[in-house]
Amino acid sequence: MKKSNGGLFIVKYNHCEKCKRIFNTETWIGEVHTYNGICPSCMAGEQQENQMQKESIQDHVINKHNIEQTENVTYVHEIPQSSPIELEKTLFSRLEQMVNDVLSKEDSMDVLIKEFKIELLDKARERIEETFQSFDVRKIDAEMIVDYAEKKFNYLSEYKDYIDNVVKKLQDNPKMNGKTAIEKVFKEAMANMPKNCTKDVLLDKKAMLKKIFGKAEKWYNIYSDTKDLFEFGNNMVLHPFKKIQKKLSTLPFYTSIN
């Protein structure tokens, strides 16, 4: 207890909430003990502990990153380097799945077709020149296979759009027969041919449409029993790709790969 000029007064004792020691006093009416605040010694200790935890977390993050980088580098080194011809074979072996991806994700069919023309058909022509002598009769057969695939690729985007329109007609009118829908799409497309193009362009467009119509009718006979419209549409679009896949797989420089 302390004495002031006017008499006696009582001290307020501020205790450290961690170590319970008194770290400060102040004048107060009545004797009071509080346990709020932290003394300088405990404050320094807490700051040091926080710094150590922070450094520990940083070290953990850095170590984890280094480990992941090492694993990635190791993984890259472990991947066998594929030859160009193996990559080409992998590409056409995945053809059907890639088309399925286009159908389900609504990606561009045009991009897929362009990729196959550049990365597969053009490369296949190079393989033919590398594999066969000019007088080898097998060279002609191989060229015919690539020509067959290329001709089909030339109309597959338009063919997909055609089948999409057929499926839409069947959705709008569930009682309509599939063959009837194919015919209606053909007649409407012929009637809506652009009028502002040259005669040669118009004839080419009509010839392409007639080809697609003929293919759609022919391949419809294979899938006419398919009840689910989504499955029907996918099967119709996939069919020419499957034929291309089957043809290309007979090329000798691809079949020789185990």
Image: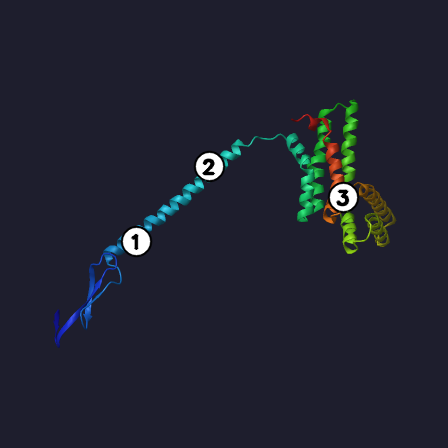
Q: Which residue is mark 2?
A: 70
Q: Which residue is mark 3?
A: 236
What residue is at 53 percent from the left and 34 percent from the top? 76
Q: Which residue is mark 1?
A: 47
Q: Nearer the viewer, mark 3 or mark 1?
A: 3
Is disc 1 placed on a helix, strand or loop? helix
What residue is at 36 percent from the left and 46 percent from the top? 56
Report the number of numbered marks: 3
Say whether residue 104 is left or right of residue 58: right
Q: Quadrant of residue 41?
A: bottom left
Disc 1: CA contacts within 10 A as few (<14), some (14-19) or many (>=20): few
Q: Nearer the viewer, residue 148 or 255?
A: 255
Say whether residue 47 is left or right of residue 200: left
Say what amino acid the circle numbered 1 marks.
Gln
Say what amino acid the circle numbered 3 marks.
Met
Say what amino acid the circle numbered 2 marks.
Thr
Check the picture and name the quadrant holding the N terminus.
bottom left
